[in-house]
Amino acid sequence: MAGRPTRRDFLSRLGVTAAAAVGGSAAGLGLAGIARAEEKPKGTIPDKPFKIGHMTFFTGAGAVLGEPMFKGGLLAADEINEKGGLLGKRKIELLKADEAAGTDANTKEMRRLKLSEKIDMFMGITSSGNTPALGPVAEELRLLTMFIDGCTDFLFDKAVPNPHYIFRITNIQSADGSTCALGVAMTWPDVKKVAHIHPDYSYGRNCFDHFSIVTKKLLPAAQNVSEAWPKLFSTDFTPHITKSLAAKPDLLVTSLWGGDYVAFYKQALQHGLFSKMKVATTLALGSAPQSIGKDHPEGVLTGCHANYHFSYPAGNRWPLNKTFVERYKAKFNEYPNFQAEGAYTATYVLKTAIEKANKLMGGWPDDDAIISQMEGMMYPGPGGYVYIRPDNHQGYKDAITGFSKNVPEYPFPILDPARIITIPIRNITAPPGWPKGDPTSTYTWIDQTWPQVKAT
Amino acid sequence: MDILVIHLFNALLYASVLFLIAGGLSLIYGVMRIVNLAHGNLYALGAFATASAVGQWFGGSNSVWLYFLLPTGAVAAAAIGAVLEPTLLRPFYRRPEEYQLLVTFGLLMILEDVMRFIWGPYPVSATVLFEKMGSAQIGEFIYPRYNLLVIGIGGLAAFLLWAFIYRTRFGVVLRATSQDMRRASALGINVNAVYVQAFTIGCFMAGLAGAIVVPGQSAVLGMGVDALVLSFIVVVIGGLGSLEGALVGALIVGLLREFAISTFPELELAVLYLIAAVVLLVRPAGLFGRTT
């Protein structure tokens, strides 16, 4: 067919780039955040605390993500409180709630926090099973809400298609599978046989769907030869590894994360899996950087939720990241993950919106004024610019992935600074005005608008 | 052919661990008629304790002696069991079953929080034991030797338990108490002592399961509840209170899971519940259960 682009043409049209991150220390650039003069707020500001209900996993296997999320929020709150609080007056007070209580209990807890504890804002959530249940409740309660994760496309595609009170800061879920597939198309365009191991819940399904639709467009010769769907939070992957080995694929794609991924790669090593095939992951380096050991093979496409890895942007290229990582490390003696960055950034998005609204109206702004300032905001967080889309209240930031590499500075692998892959987020997510689709709007958008590249 | 052998090993690996957990649960129920919901977290505790001993206290060591630390988890779980039975459970034997369920369920949650308190939210591992043994060549594939050790321990435990219960004097006492507690007591058997011993052995088995699992996998919060659900499936299939049932149930679950994953991957989660449902319909007391 004439007019079909080649893979390389289309990838460059998408803006998928592998760039060497210039590291090192550019002397004289050691700024501590954006040094902006603190302006005096207009009008009288009450000094009662600003209560944020922070719900995430504090118990159970999900705590591996929940703890860093809370710590990110706590760091931001402490920094703001040290300077007197929001608008210099209202100290942020965090109320913890455990997401592990279950979806039903979580919705009740959200009501209780709003009605009894009188929280001013709700923040948090890790699980994609919880945001679609809590979103409608927050709208009903008129509760200003910033979901940190729980990144399912379903929330703003179907559950709350026209959000007013709820926002979400980390990247939309479909970007994960698409980013992984683009990384593969760019790095290993010759793969023919693909095996999959994904946790059997919405995240795993979503990664599988979007990886598959992107490879259908960009790697027409690739086909799936094996699928395995282990239960979320299981740690025995022996049968899944055996099955993948038996299918003799060129590439294994997995969206396992947290303790699951740690158990998986240790077992896969003893089965010689990494030496028999290439491996691409969506969230391997995402949950807790220090949980992966140096025995992890190098050169694996190791995703970080297409979102944030503390090692990028490196050095002094993006001072906001340098100071964030240093402060987080100093306070908690560990390195932040994408959720820590999400909660940290979300808190500053809130602070900025409140300050802007105050500048316009004076006094403490009401929720609608804060919301109108958050809509359309472009905020520079540690991981880069995040844009809050006004129509669906979703935060978007350019997707990144990369390859595992051991460097002497850290006792665990990081993303190879010389081979970071970045993708402009607008080129891999359904744009405003695109009709809601199934399984996701992004899926139908890719399916209907991306060209089928020439088989090479 | 090689791949069939590996599939069989995988099934036996899973069954060995399940047998230890479900066997302990069944032993306790068989003797004391108590469904110990905290059992799952005694398994998890075994995993965390061994991970601590191997991975943290002696972290960095590469000595063969580390393998002798493997039973740490089993001993820790047994010690906790020996304390729990006389203090927490004994007062509830005369009460209706609901009380026992509430107490053991509460204990399950308390133990979960205790583990979080001690070990924190991140996975704890003892992979040095898993990696040190390397892998064996099976045809064109390689297979971790440690997994074979786990299968061996599972088989040995099943044999020792059988010998203990059917070939020793204490086994006779245990079976007598299990069949009729009042009459055994009238014959001069110290029922309280038998109970605490049976409970301790049951906890030891759970802890041992956690201990042998942790080098190849890792200790994570929430693993206990998952294990509890799985061991209930095993005892539903095999029959609650029967050790033979636990063994056969574990083998059935291990083989079916392996078969499902390799042929109908989407059924991995459903297949175990399906077989449990079928057994409940056909033989409500389980394959080896006593119909009372």
Image (cartoon, helix red, strand yellow):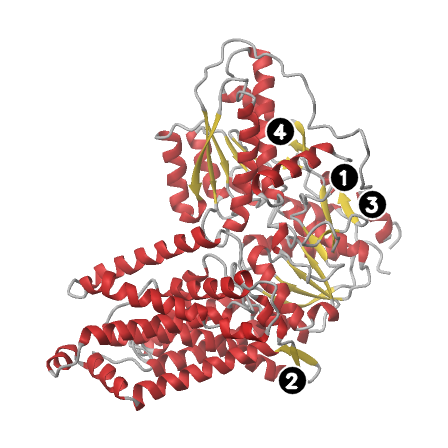
Chain hosting mark 3: A
The tag on residue A19 is: 3
For the point 53% across and 20% down, the residue is A84
Please state which amino acid type lies under the numbered disc 1. Answer: Gly
User: Distance from label 2 to label 3 (Cα)?
Assistant: 44 Å
Please state which amino acid type lies under the numbered disc 2. Answer: Asp
Per the image, the residue denoted by label 1 is A315
Residue in front for this viewpoint, B47 or A365: B47
Query: Residue A61, position in %: x, y?
Result: 49, 54
Mark in front: 1 vs 4 = 1
Residue in front for this viewpoint, B98 or B174: B174
Mark in front: 4 vs 2 = 2
Query: Residue B65, position in %: x, y?
Result: 55, 74
CB under 8 Å between discs 1 and 4: no
CB under 8 Å between discs 3 and 4: no
Both labels 2 and 3 in a single chain:
no
Lower position in the chain sequence, tag 1 or tag 4: 1
CB under 8 Å between discs 1 and 3: no
Quarter of the image with the C terminus of chain A is bottom right
User: Distance from label 1 to label 2 (Cα)?
Assistant: 50 Å
Per the image, the residue denoted by label 4 is A390
Per the image, the residue denoted by label 2 is B2
